[in-house]
Amino acid sequence: MEDSILDFTTNLAILHRQFQRAMNQLLEADKMPVNITEFYLLVLISETRQLNQRRAAWTMAVDEGLMARMVHHLVELELIQKETDPRDRRNRRLQLTPAGQELVQQAITVLHDWWQQATPNQSDFDYAVITAQLQRLSSRVLQKQQANTH
């Protein structure tokens, strides 16, 4: 019996783990001072206005302790800065520094190279279509998760 959802899940997990391992090795080889999870955080910050530490932890599905350690590390590296949210002084808003923006651009180049090598040659592989579908799934999962936590 063919189970396309199981196949999708398995292949997504394989791609995710292989990508993480390769990116960690490439980031290390390129002497970038971050791991893949910190890179994900930097990208999330670069793509999200007014992102706070708590929301970043929730979006990335990591506990707040790990998020605090990552933020502390990235602040020490002067890749991000955090400021108190004037609307809610309990929250810390995260912003990239110019050095953080530069590192994100370098790492994105590495990311593009990896995916270009992973993409089958002479194929009609369309990342835009897959991305749109994955964004719909991600949005739905995040909305359901948010509804369950409130």
Image (cartoon, rainbow, N blue to C red):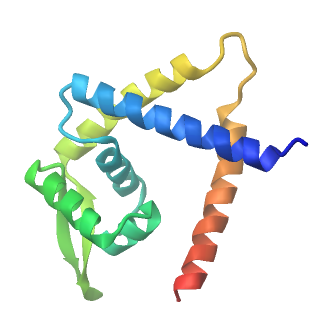
As drawn, the residue found furthest toward the left would be 76
As drawn, the residue found furthest toward the right would be 1
Question: x and y percent of residue 150 in the render?
Answer: 53, 89
How many marks the image carries: the answer is: 0
The answer to whether 16 appears left or right of 28 in the picture is right
Q: Vertical placement of 28 versus 72: above or below? A: above
Please give the name of the residue rendered at 69% of the width and 57% of the height, measured from the top-left corner: 136
Q: Vertical placement of 19 versus 70: above or below? A: above
Give 83 or 133, whichever is nearer the viewer. Answer: 133
Quadrant of the snapshot with the N terminus: top right
Q: Vertical placement of 33 versus 82: above or below? A: above
The answer to whether 19 appears left or right of 119 in the picture is left
Q: Is residue 141 visible to us here? A: yes
Q: Is residue 52 visible to us here? A: no
Question: x and y percent of residue 61 in the render?
Answer: 44, 64
Please give the name of the residue rendered at 62% of the width and 42% of the height, measured from the top-left corner: 12
Question: x and y percent of residue 43 in the render?
Answer: 38, 48
Please give the name of the residue rendered at 29% of the width and 49% of the height, measured from the top-left corner: 38
Question: x and y percent of residue 13 in the render?
Answer: 58, 43
Please give the name of the residue rendered at 38% of the width and 64% of the height, measured from the top-left corner: 62
- Image quarter for residue 124? top right
Q: Vertical placement of 55 versus 89: above or below? A: above
As drawn, the residue found furthest toward the top would be 122
The answer to whether 22 appears left or right of 121 in the picture is left
